Image (spheres, grey):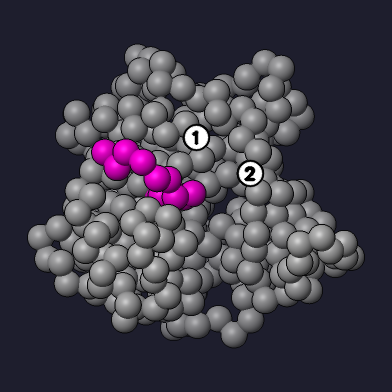
Amino acid sequence: MESDFILVVGSCNVDLTCYVQRMPVVGETMYGDSFHQRYGGKGANQAVAAKKLGVPVCMVAKVGEDSYGKSYVELLEQIGVDTKEIHIVPSVHTGIAQIVVSGNGANLIVIIPGANKYLCVDDVQSESIKHLLSTAEVGLFQFEIDVETTQKAMEIMKSHGKGTTILNCAPAIKGDKKIHSLADILILNEIEVFGTVGVGVSNPCDAEAAMQKLLELGSNVVIITLGSKGAVYATSTDHRVIHVPVSPVDQPVDTTGAGDAFCGALAYMFIKCKHLSLLQKISFACKAARHSVLGQGTHDTFPTNESVQQFLQSD
């Protein structure tokens, strides 16, 4: 790997997505509009989002011994993600995400971890992965694999003091908050904020209380993404809550993966645009996330390096 690369330790899922006009209520059977099978998982999505923007990316993950697993690894290789640390788990299925997307672009997601839960502490302590953790410029982590494994990987990366650790608290977890203090940058959406500190956030104006509680967890930077309202952030050295707006999308098609587009784009900025301010980096990530909701699915809607200037100039 090149010296300046992103290391993603996370999940690979197959997304089974149903598109409907509205969400069904409990007990209701309804007809949908269409069905699509795509590849997802927060870890892999973030890896693809960063790679499509034009930065070296290596991924640590596990997939199942099925057609999904084999084809997913092949797809990531075609995109250009380094897959040498993506391993197949015998007699186990690849992770599955059952997704329902309504007519206004909102989504509901149920995840069956499959092979993802087999990525363990011993794996990230192998010499090859420890080397990657010690040399990566940016580490991207989420909560779709075993939390202890994620924590150990972050501890190894922090112990070498080189890379920036970015933790996307998705899905939110309760309990020991030590892992949050290992993140240089903590990223959460409104639901994950409530699940983490029990404080609701719905707009930039009411983020103050939640932000202060999140900063107490020990991260240097906390970012709360707010969908069409952009994002807010604060730092451990300056607790002021700064709002980063984004131009609204009149009719979002599918918001699935927007948070992953944000995380991948932010990681990209920490490698390719180190000279820019934190506000500028977050603003770029917001615009990448906005771009991703203009079409169906995840990988296909993430902006490429070639499309970056086009959608930036459209603002």
Give me the residue at 28% from left, 52% from top.
Answer: 185
Residue segment shown in magenta:
168-178
Q: Is residue 281 visible?
A: no
Query: Of the numbered discs in the image, which one, if any, rests on residue 145?
Result: 1
Is 141 colored magenta in this rendering? no
Residue 306 drawn at (x, y percent) = 50, 62
Above or below for 34 versus 227: above
Q: How many residues crowd around disc 1 within 10 Å: few (fewer than 14), some, or many (20 or more)?
A: many
Position of 13 with respect to 259 (left or right) is right
Residue 20 drawn at (x, y percent) = 79, 68
Give me the residue at 12% from left, 66% from top.
Answer: 238
* Residue closest to the eye, 192 or 165: 192
Residue farthest to the left, as pictured = 237
Q: Is residue 208 visible?
A: yes
Mark with earlier residue (1, 2): 2
Q: Which quarter of the rendered picture does the N terminus lie within? A: top left
Give me the residue at 58% from left, 44% from top.
Answer: 41
Image quadrant where residue 273 sits? bottom left
Query: Of the numbered discs in the image, which one, if any, rests on residue 111?
Result: 2
Above or below for 270 versus 315: above
Above or below for 260 versus 130: below
Q: How many residues crowd around disc 2 within 10 Å: few (fewer than 14), some, or many (20 or more)?
A: some
Kind of residue at badge 1:
Ile
Give me the residue at 49% from left, 54% from top.
Answer: 260
* Residue closest to the eye, 114 or 261: 114
